[in-house]
Each structure stands twice: as C-alpha cells, then as structure tokens.
Amino acid sequence: MNKKSNSASNVDQFASRVVSSVCEQAMFAQKIEILYGNLLGSVFANFLGAVLVYISLNVVDYNPVLIVWFSGVGIVTLLRVISLYLYRKQYLIPSFYLPVFFIGAMASAFFWGFCVSYLMPFDNFLAQMIIIVVIAGVTAGVAHSLKWGFLVNVLSQFSVISPLCA
C-alpha cells in the first residue's frame, strides 16, 4: 500500500512538472509574440525619429560622426526588420528570438544614447529641442513596446536618458 501511494505521488509530481513546463513554454512563446508584434511600429518610429534628427543636425552643421550614427541606426533597423521576418517565417528555433530581440533593442538604445552624448549641439537650442522631443518619443515608445522585457526596458531607458542628465 505504501509502495502504491509513493508511486502515485511520484506520478503526480512528474505530471505537475510537465504541466508547469508546458505552461512556462506557452508563456515564453506568448511573450515573444507580444514583443515581436510591437516591433514593426517601433522600428518604423525609431527610424523616422533618426531621420528627423539627422536632417535637423545636418542642416545646422556638417558632422561626419552624424553620418556614422545614422548609418548605424539604419543597419540596426535593417537587422531588426530581418529578425522580424525570420520570426514570422519561423526559420529558427523559438528560444533564439528573445535574445536577438533584446540585442537589437539595446543596440538601438546605444545609438540613441550616443546621439544624446556626442551629437547634441550646444550652441543651437532649436536642434537641442528637436533631439530632446525625439528622445522623449523614443523612450515612450520603448516603454510601451518593451513592457514585457522589464530588464531590457530599464537598461534601454537608462542608456538613452542618462546622457541627458550629464
């Protein structure tokens, strides 16, 4: 009798682990779906903000670093769109997409932080205000689209906003 109850207990523990694992996998898949579901609009808005900043800063003063920054933003945008395409076509294993998404989000945040740190014109208040408004829009978009990735949300917000405080 004790042997049967012990074996039933083991089966119950195994079943609960399987159900827990299936639930965790389903939640993970849903998290990825939500993150990638918001990606296209976020990437488009990010690139549109970069174009606005590029035009406003290029009119003020020619800066070769501005071209490098804009090229970097363009490359990151292209890579993020490619990762969205690969996700939609399911070419790769599902666990691959979350780190790729986070790396793309952090690369984008790095470029915006670089923009605020090194490309902010100190003598042109209009260009400063345009950059600050675009940065505010980018950080608001990041907060919305990365709400399911708390750590990346906080890190990207910090890397974009902290240079403004300096």
Image (cartoon, rainbow, N blue to C red):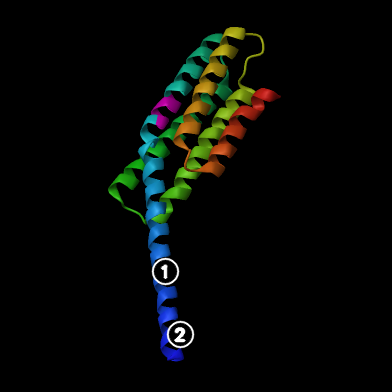
Hey, which residue is sitting farthest front in the picture? Answer: 1
Residue at horizontal 63 percent and vertical 14 percent from the top: 121
* Residue 107 coordinates in the image, percent (x, y): 52, 38
Are the residues tagged 2 and 1 within 8 Å (C-beta)? no
> Which sits in the foreground, 105 or 69?
105
Q: Is residue 122 left or right of residue 136?
A: right
Residue 61 in sight from this viewpoint: no
**Which SS class for mark 2?**
helix
Looking at marks 2 and 1 on the same chain, the residue that comes earlier in the sequence is marked by 2
Relative to 163, residue 93 above or below? below
In the picture of the structure, the residue carrying the numbered disc 1 is 16
As measured in the structure, the alpha-carbon distance from the residue carrying label 2 to the one carrying label 1 is: 15 Å
The span shown in magenta is 42-47
Q: Quadrant of the N terminus?
A: bottom left
- Label 2 packing within 10 angstroms: few (<14), some (14-19), many (20+): few
In the picture of the structure, the residue carrying the numbered disc 2 is 6
Residue at horizontal 43 percent and vertical 85 percent from the top: 5
Does the segment drawn in magenta span residue 46?
yes
Specify the amino acid type for callout 2.
Asn
- Label 1 packing within 10 angstroms: few (<14), some (14-19), many (20+): few
* Residue 46 coordinates in the image, percent (x, y): 45, 27
